[in-house]
């Protein structure tokens, strides 16, 4: 299965590939994605359409996986499709992708093209800590309950320190750790879905629709 993956870091994309393979139970061949304006949430969001059109018209990729951090924006919740939250990045991305999809012409090779969207709450490092001693209280529920009380139980810098030992890891080291933790999580992907049902669960649900 040939797929494009777009995230805030090449390290995250390497991890997402492994996690997606665990969900789909098939091997993924990644179609390289080149970004013109760097990384980070804003840069990635601004280049979604360019990346989608490149994959759709110039490759045989069957879809795009898109994952970003929520940072301090709203946590995605199941009721959002009916009660729209303009501060939810996952909802924003899905709406954007739907608009892009409606502007696409018929694909020359007629290969179906799908989207799968995930939101790491509050950052992808929380996923990497899942099912570890340091990650016991780093779940979506813990984050939501704390945000509801206007208290932060932890921040993104702390998550990075717990995962990498520093909040400024080099890209090679970040990639090494991301792959290691994703490989561990892939052994039982249900644990990640249980701890992050809205952000990672949304990604997993989207992916499973590809093979139904």
Image (cartoon, helix red, strand yellow):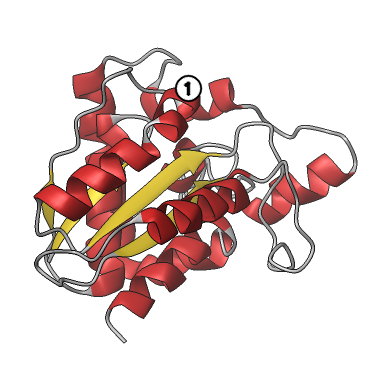
Label 1 crowd (10 A; few <14 / some 14-19 / many >=20): some
**SS at mark 1 in the image:** helix
Where is residue 37 shown, x and y percent of the image?
33, 17
Where is residue 102 shown, x and y percent of the image?
43, 60
Where is residue 66 shown, x and y percent of the image?
38, 48
Viewer can see residue 10: yes
Q: For the point 55% across and 20% down, which residue is it?
A: 157
Residue 28 lies in quadrant: bottom left
Where is residue 171 shown, x and y percent of the image?
25, 20
Q: For the point 23% across and 54% down, which residue is it?
A: 18
Decide if residue 94 is on the left or right side of residue 2: right
Q: For the point 36% across and 22% down, which residue is it?
A: 39
Residue 122 lies in quadrant: top right
**Quick one: 203 or 61, which is closer to the camera?**
61
Residue placed under numbered mark 1 in the picture: 161
Q: How many marks?
A: 1
Residue 125 in the image: above or below residue 170: below
Decide if residue 92 is on the left or right side of residue 51: right
Residue 72 lies in quadrant: top right
In what quadrant of the picture does the N terminus appear? bottom left
Viewer can see residue 180: no
Residue 186 in the image: above or below residue 86: below
Decide if residue 62 is on the left or right side of residue 126: left
**Quick one: 151 or 56, which is closer to the camera?**
56
Residue 134 in the image: above or below residue 100: above
Q: For the point 68% across and 48% down, which residue is it?
A: 75
Q: Looking at this rendering, what residue extends furthest in the right direction?
A: 149
In what quadrant of the picture does the C terminus appear? bottom left
């Amino acid at each position: 299965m040939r797929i494009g993956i777009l995230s805030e870091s090449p390290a995250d994309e390497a991890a997402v590939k492994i996690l997606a393979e665990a969900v789909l139970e098939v091997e993924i061949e990644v179609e390289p994605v080149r970004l013109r304006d760097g990384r980070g949430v804003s840069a990635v969001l601004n280049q979604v359409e360019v990346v989608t059109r490149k994959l759709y018209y110039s490759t045989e990729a069957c879809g795009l996986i898109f994952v970003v951090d929520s940072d301090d924006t709203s946590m995605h919740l199941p009721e959002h499709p009916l009660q729209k939250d303009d501060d939810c990045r996952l909802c924003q991305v899905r709406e954007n992708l739907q608009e892009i999809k409606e502007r696409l012409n018929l694909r020359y090779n007629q290969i179906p093209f799908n989207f799968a969207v995930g939101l790491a709450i509050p950052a992808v490092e929380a996923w990497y800590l899942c099912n570890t001693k340091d990650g016991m209280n780093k779940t979506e529920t813990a984050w939501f309950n704390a945000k509801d009380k206007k208290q932060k139980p932890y921040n993104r810098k702390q998550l990075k320190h717990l995962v990498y030992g520093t909040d400024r890891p080099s890209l090679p080291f970040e990639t090494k750790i991301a792959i290691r933790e994703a490989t561990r999580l892939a052994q039982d992907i249900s644990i990640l879905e249980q701890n992050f049902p809205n952000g990672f669960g949304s990604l997993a649900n989207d992916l499973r629709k590809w093979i139904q």
